[in-house]
Image (cartoon, rainbow, N blue to C red):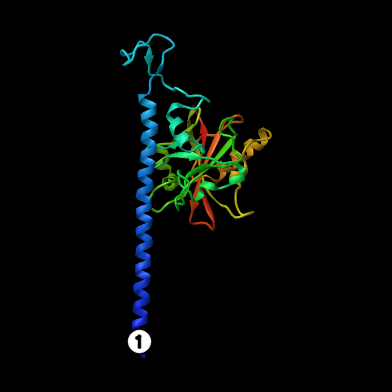
Amino acid sequence: MKKALYVIVIMILIIAFCVSAFLVARYVLEGKKQADRYEDLANIKNQAQTSVPTQATKPSTATEPSKPGFEVISDPTVEGGILLDYAELHDMNPDLAGWIKIEGTKVDYPVMQTSTNNKDYYLKRDFDKQDSVRGCIYAREECDLDKPSDNITIYGHNMADGSMFHSLMSYTEKSAWDYNSLIFFDTLKERHIYKIFSVFKTSANAGKGFSYHQFVDAQNETEFNDFVTNCKNLSFYDTGITPKYGDKIICLSTCEYTLNNGRLVVAAVRIS
């Protein structure tokens, strides 16, 4: 009887180990596959930005172009005003809304956006719309990236392997802000630089925390200033930066695990 029970326990442990090993292996392999895919997408973007000539509108003072009458310009666009670097990626997936990058971190990803009829579509889908625990970086559906809205909330998972928005966790320490406080966020039509003015954590439970994501467009100056004040009051440290009414803000949001249903938010104001 005891021997039979011992065998059953051993079998259960073996099965549990095998299942755990399988899940870990799948997680690692999916991470490698998705990292390779994002590298491919970045290469497509970078090659388009640096190598495609556009017909010149005036004589070039630079080195003689490879083709007569052509020169490389800084921000060529295609029909619809889309920046050339994003044209091919947009053809691959029309949900592409931009690109976000933070130097010195792993944050270097396309930003997706869907309509309000498909909320959180990319929470667990990759760029190719396949199921993925890592999902995509994506903008809140109610936000207008072209106008733009006063505040654009951008979501990303906090992955244990350091991918997606995990790097944002380093900004709970001011030393990370001192090292680099800039965020590069392109829409399909414009390039912009943002400077971090607040880093805070809050609960996403209804009625328990700061609903930063619900602030999209200020109805007046008071509402805008109240939002900024809340961000700064919750901040881990004082950056000395206070956005003014009329400035444009982005809030990068990821999961935070010291709070119940916590969120870490990196808020930045457009400076260029």
Residue found at the very far front of the displayed protein:
91
Q: In the figure, residue 140 lies in which quadrant?
A: top right
Q: Could you say where residue 153 lies in the image, as x and y percent from the top left?
A: 55, 41
- Classify 49 as above or below 30: above
Residue 104 seen anywhere in this rendered image of the structure: no
- Classify 116 as above or below 184: below
Q: Residue at x 60, y 51 (%)?
A: 209
How many numbered discs sit on the rendered protein?
1
- Classify 55 as above or below 251: above
Judge by depth and name the residue closer to the eye, 13 or 54: 54
Q: In the figure, residue 19 lies in which quadrant?
A: bottom left
Q: Residues within 10 Å of mark 1 (few under 14, many from 20)?
A: few
Q: On the picture, is 166 further left or further right than 229?
A: left
- Classify 263 as above or below 48: below
Q: Residue at x 34, y 59 (%)?
A: 25
Q: On the picture, is 244 further left or further right than 7?
A: right
Q: On the picture, is 58 further left or further right than 122?
A: left
Q: Amino acid at mark 1?
A: Ala
Q: Could you say where residue 12 lies in the image, as x and y percent from the top left?
A: 38, 76
Q: Which residue is mark 1?
A: 4
Instruction: Kindly state the secondary structure of the residue where label 1 is placed.
Output: helix
Residue found at the very far right of the displayed protein:
219
Q: Residue at x 66, y 37 (%)?
A: 223
Q: Could you say where residue 179 lies in the image, as x and y percent from the top left?
A: 38, 37
Q: Could you say where residue 94 lies in the image, as x and y percent from the top left?
A: 51, 36
Residue 270 seen anywhere in this rendered image of the structure: yes
Q: Residue at x 39, y 47 (%)?
A: 34
